[in-house]
Every structure is written in C-alpha cells, then in structure tokens.
Amino acid sequence: GMLTARALVRVGARHIVLVSRSGKVSYSDQGLEESLRWLQEESGAEVLLRSCDVSDESSVRALVKEVCGLPCCGVDDSN
C-alpha cells in the first residue's frame, strides 16, 4: 500500500487514506519508514491514517462517510 501511495502522489494524487484494522501504520519491520515520512511531511498530499475492519459493515460505512468528500479516483487493496 505504501509504495502504491507514493506512486499515486508522484502522478498527482493530493489525498491519500492509509487504512489498517488498528489505524496504526507501522512499517518498521518493512523498511518503509522513509516512505511514510515523505508522504506525511514532504509530498504536499493530505495523508490520513484510519482504522477500518473490512469484515465489519459499520466500520466500512463509517470510513466511507468520513472520506466521502475527498476526490477519489481509485482504491487499492494491498494485502
């Protein structure tokens, strides 16, 4: 997901929502801390970190309601 987010920002995306079940984005074991720092501090994009359990309909509805005002051109599921 992080690599996709970086690529999207590089081609013009200005709003990125990174979603996990916990709402925490931990890339310390994957070596992606620099990518997260770049997205949050230097990319110029608005980066939101949110929690959502996609097996729970109410959780998905709440996330969609929160971000429905943002321009959306696509969704990437990177498991």
Image (cartoon, helix red, strand yellow):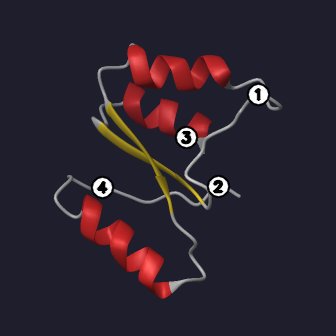
The residue carrying mark 1 is 28
Give how far apart the Cα atoms at labels 3 and 2 are: 8 Å
Q: Mark 1 and mark 4 in contact (Cβ < 8 Å)?
A: no
CA neighbours of label 1 inside 10 A, class few (<14), some (14 to 19), many (20+): few
Answer with mark 4 or mark 1, whichever residue precedes in sequence: 1
3 relative to 67, above or below = above
Give how far apart the Cα atoms at labels 4 and 1 are: 29 Å
State which quarter of the image contains the N terminus: top right
Q: Mark 1 and mark 3 in contact (Cβ < 8 Å)?
A: no
The answer to whether residue 56 is left or right of residue 74 is right
Percent across and percent down for residue 79 are: 71, 58
Q: Residue at x 58, y 22 (%)?
A: 35
Residue type beneath disc 2 = Ser
The residue carrying mark 3 is 4
Answer with mark 2 or mark 4, whichever residue precedes in sequence: 4
Between tags 4 and 1, which lies in front?
1
Answer with mark 3 or mark 1, whichever residue precedes in sequence: 3
Q: Residue at x 38, y 58 (%)?
A: 74
